Image (spheres, coloured by chain):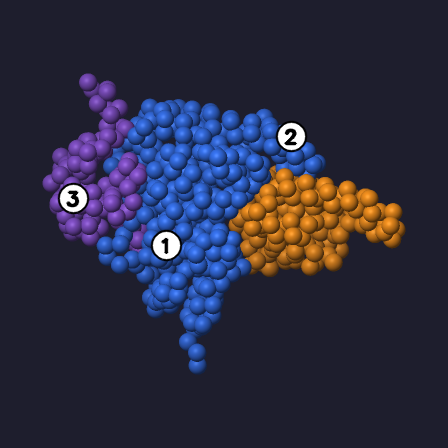
C-alpha cells in the first residue's frame, strides 16, 4: 500500500485503483489471518477522526485523505464536512481516537481548527491525542501557531506524518 | 489587490493605458500566441511591437483612433462606441457590439 | 562571509539563502517537475537566469521592455469588495465599479465578471442579476470582459446536490457506484454551464473563464471540456479561457476520457492540447506552491511545468499566478518581491503568452 500511495501521488494510479488495492490487501490479510499471531492481522495502526470544520463544505480533499489513511491501515472515522466543532470532540471520545485530522479550505473557516484544539485543552484531552491540520490555506506556520502536532501538504504526506506520530 | 497590481507592474501591457486589451483580444478571438498577436496589432496600428506597451505612444494613437483612453477628452468614444472602432481596427467581431447593432437596426 | 539573499518560503515567511542554496533548490524543484511530468528539466542557463532574477537586489523586478504580456484576472471583483476571509480588501462597491477600476485604474488587459460564490451552479438562481450586470458592464467597458466561475463539481454531490457522494461510496468500496455518481454529476455540470453561458452571451459577454478546472478531479475536467465543446459549437466567436486547479489532474473516477485520452493523471503539458481540442482559446496552467519549500524550489518546479505546457500547447497559455500557485507564496497578501520575481520568471523563462 505504501507503493500504491506513492503511485497515486505521482498520477500513475487513481482513487479506484487505491481502493481496489486496499480491498485486495484486506482479503489477503484475511486469508493469512489463521497463520498470523493473534490480533496481529486485524490490528489497526491507529484510530483517526477526520473531518472538515464547521462552515466549510469542501469535501473532496478531506475524503481523499481519509481514503489514503484507511487504505494504509488506519481505522478512520470520516465525520464529513461542515462538522460542528463539538462533534470532533464527541467522536474522539466515542472512538477513543489517537489522532484527529481537520481540514479547512477557506481562510474564513481555518480558525475552526484552532478552536477544536482549545476545546481539547479545556476538556483535558489534548495530551492524549495528536492533531493534524490541512487544507489550502493551512501551512506549517499555521500549525505551529495554533499548537497542532503536524501539517500535511497532501494525502500521501498525511499518511507518512500519521505514521511518524502514531507508530 | 497587491498581487494583480504587482503582476501588471512587472509583466503587464497596461490595458487601455497602452494596447494590452487589443493584444488580449487577438489571443482570445484568434488563438494567437503572444508574438503573433503583438505583430498583428502592431501592423494594424502602424507601430512597433515594443510601442504596444508604451503609454506615450499609445495615448495619442488611441485617442486618434477612437478606441478608448484613460483620462479621455470630451466626446471621445467610450464603452461600446470604442469597441465598435476596435472591431474595425482589428477586423474582428465583438459580441456586445453585435448585440448593440441588432438593437438599433 | 558568504552573501545571503532574502527570499521567501512557500508560505511567505522570510528566509535567507546563499547562492549555492538557491541554485540547489532551483535544480531540485526543476528535477521534481521533470521527474513527475516526464518533461525536460531546466537547462543550466535557465537555472542561472532564474537565480539572477531571484537575487536581484531590488524590491521589484520587471520584464525587459518589449516582453510584456497581457494580464488577465479571475475571481471577478471579489478582490475589491470581498472581505473577512473572502480574498478581498473590503471596499464596498458595485461590480461595475470594481470592473471599471480594474480597467481604468489598474491597467488590466482583460477583466471578468463573477458572483460572490464564484461557482457555476449557484449562478442559476441569480441568472437575471448576472445578465443585467454583464449588460451594464459591457456598455461601459472597453477591455475584454468574460464571465468567470468555477466548475466545482463537488456541489452536485450530497448533501449539496442530487448525486451520492463518491468519496463516501469509495470509502465503502462501492467503486462502480462512485464512478456512476461522478458521471451523472459531470453531465449536469456541463448542462448547467452551457445554460448559464447561453444567457450571458445574450447579454453581451465576450466569453467565459473556467476557473480551477479539475478541482473535483477528472470528472470536473470531463464536464468542463464538454461544456467548452458545446459552447464553441453554439458560439463560434466566444472567448474561452480554460484555467486549471492544479498541476496533476486527480484521478477520482480514473477512466473518463476525452478525445481518446484518459484524463486522470494528466500534467499541464498534456492538459493544454485537450483544452485546445475542445475549443478553448487560452489555456491556464496551474502549479501549486508547496508551503514547506523555498521560493527557489517552488519557482524552479513551476517554471519547468509551465515551460513544457507552453511548448506543447497549440493555444496561448496564460499561467495562473494567484495566491499559492505559480511559485507565488500561499499567503493572503503575497509579498510584492516574490510576486514580481515569479511573474518575470514565467514570462522570460517559461515563455508564457499571458498571466
Residue at 75 percent across and 52 percent down: it is: A45
* Place of residue A165 in the rendered image (x, y in percent of width and height, measured from the top left): 70, 58
Helix, strand or loop status at disc 1: helix
Packing grade of label 2 (10 A; few <14, some 14-19, many >=20) is: some
Mark 3, residue position: B43
Let me know if marks 2 and 1 both belong to one chain.
yes
Q: The orange chain is which one?
A: A
Q: On screen, C297 above or below C112?
A: below
Gap in angstroms between the C-alphas marked 3 and 2: 57 Å
Residue at the image point whose x is 35% and y is 42% from the top: C314
x, y (%) of residue C123?
45, 29
Residue of label 2 = C177
Q: Is residue C23 visible?
A: yes
Question: What is the number of the mark on residue C350?
Answer: 1
In this orientation, which residue lies closer to the viewer: C153 or C14? C153
C14 lies left or right of C282: right
The answer to whether mark 1 and mark 3 are in CB contact below 8 A is no
Residue B10, image x, y percentages: 31, 55
Of all residues, the one furthest to the top in this rendering is B105
Q: Distance between the residues labelled 2 and 1?
A: 42 Å
Amino acid at each position: 500500500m505504501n507503493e500504491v500511495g506513492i503511485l497515486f501521488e505521482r498520477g500513475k494510479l487513481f482513487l479506484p485503483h487505491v481502493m481496489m488495492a486496499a480491498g485486495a490487501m484486506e482479503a489477503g490479510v484475511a486469508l493469512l489471518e489463521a497463520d498470523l499471531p493473534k490480533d496481529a492481522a486485524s490490528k489497526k495502526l491507529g484510530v483517526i477522526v477526520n473531518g472538515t470544520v464547521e462552515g466549510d463544505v469542501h469535501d473532496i480533499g478531506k475524503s481523499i485523505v481519509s481514503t489514503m489513511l484507511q487504505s494504509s491501515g488506519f481505522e478512520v472515522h470520516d465525520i464529513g464536512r461542515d462538522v460542528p466543532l463539538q462533534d470532533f470532540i464527541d467522536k474522539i471520545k466515542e472512538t477513543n481516537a489517537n489522532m484527529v485530522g481537520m481540514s479547512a479550505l477557506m481562510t474564513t473557516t481555518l480558525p475552526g481548527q484552532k478552536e477544536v484544539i482549545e476545546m481539547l485543552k479545556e476538556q483535558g484531552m489534548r495530551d492524549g491525542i495528536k492533531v493534524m491540520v490541512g487544507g489550502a490555506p493551512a501551512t506549517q506556520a499555521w500549525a505551529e501557531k495554533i499548537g497542532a502536532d503536524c501539517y500535511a501538504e497532501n494525502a500521501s504526506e498525511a499518511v507518512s506524518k500519521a505514521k511518524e506520530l502514531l507508530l | 489587490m497587491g498581487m494583480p497590481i504587482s503582476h501588471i507592474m512587472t509583466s503587464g501591457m497596461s490595458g487601455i493605458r497602452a494596447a494590452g486589451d487589443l493584444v488580449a483580444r487577438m489571443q482570445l478571438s484568434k488563438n494567437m500566441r503572444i508574438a503573433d498577436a503583438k505583430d498583428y496589432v502592431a501592423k494594424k496600428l502602424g507601430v512597433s511591437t515594443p510601442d504596444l506597451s508604451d503609454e506615450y505612444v499609445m495615448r495619442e494613437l488611441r485617442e486618434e483612433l477612437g478606441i478608448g483612453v484613460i483620462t479621455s477628452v470630451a466626446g471621445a468614444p467610450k464603452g461600446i462606441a470604442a469597441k465598435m472602432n476596435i472591431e474595425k481596427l482589428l477586423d474582428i467581431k465583438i459580441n456586445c457590439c453585435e448585440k448593440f447593432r441588432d438593437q438599433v437596426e | 562571509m558568504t552573501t545571503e539573499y532574502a527570499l521567501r518560503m512557500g508560505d511567505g515567511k522570510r528566509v535567507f539563502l546563499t547562492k549555492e542554496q538557491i541554485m540547489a533548490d532551483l535544480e531540485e524543484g526543476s528535477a521534481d517537475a521533470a521527474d513527475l511530468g516526464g518533461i525536460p528539466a531546466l537547462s543550466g542557463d535557465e537555472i542561472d537566469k532564474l537565480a539572477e532574477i531571484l537575487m536581484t537586489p531590488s524590491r521589484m523586478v520587471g520584464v525587459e521592455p518589449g516582453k510584456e504580456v497581457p494580464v488577465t484576472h479571475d475571481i471577478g471583483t471579489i478582490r475589491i469588495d470581498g472581505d473577512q476571509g473572502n480574498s478581498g480588501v473590503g471596499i464596498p462597491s458595485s461590480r461595475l465599479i470594481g470592473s471599471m477600476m480594474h480597467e481604468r485604474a489598474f491597467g488590466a488587459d482583460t477583466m471578468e465578471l463573477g458572483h460572490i460564490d464564484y461557482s457555476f451552479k449557484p449562478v442559476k438562481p441569480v441568472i437575471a442579476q448576472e445578465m443585467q450586470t454583464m449588460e451594464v458592464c459591457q456598455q461601459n467597458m472597453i477591455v475584454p470582459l468574460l464571465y468567470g466561475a468555477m466548475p466545482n463539481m463537488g456541489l452536485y454531490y450530497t448533501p449539496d446536490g442530487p448525486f451520492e457522494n463518491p468519496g463516501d461510496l469509495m470509502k465503502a468500496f462501492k467503486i462502480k457506484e462512485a464512478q456512476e455518481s461522478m458521471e451523472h454529476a459531470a453531465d449536469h455540470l456541463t448542462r448547467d454551464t452551457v445554460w448559464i453561458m447561453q444567457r450571458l452571451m445574450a447579454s453581451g459577454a465576450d466569453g467565459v473563464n473556467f476557473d480551477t478546472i479539475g478541482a473535483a478531479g477528472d470528472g470536473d475536467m470531463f464536464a468542463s471540456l464538454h461544456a467548452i465543446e458545446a459552447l464553441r459549437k453554439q458560439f463560434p466567436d466566444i472567448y474561452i479561457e480554460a484555467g486549471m486547479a492544479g498541476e496533476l489532474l486527480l484521478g477520482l473516477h480514473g477512466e473518463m476520457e476525452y478525445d481518446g485520452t484518459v484524463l486522470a493523471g494528466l500534467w499541464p503539458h498534456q492538459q493544454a492540447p485537450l483544452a485546445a481540442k475542445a475549443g478553448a482559446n487560452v489555456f491556464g496552467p496551474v502549479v501549486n506552491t508547496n508551503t514547506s519549500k523555498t521560493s527557489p524550489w517552488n519557482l524552479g518546479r513551476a517554471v519547468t511545468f509551465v515551460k513544457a505546457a507552453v511548448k506543447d500547447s497549440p493555444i496561448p497559455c496564460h499561467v495562473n499566478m494567484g495566491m499559492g500557485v505559480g511559485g507565488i507564496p500561499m499567503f493572503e497578501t503575497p509579498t510584492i518581491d516574490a510576486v514580481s520575481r515569479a511573474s518575470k520568471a514565467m514570462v522570460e523563462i517559461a515563455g508564457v503568452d499571458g498571466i
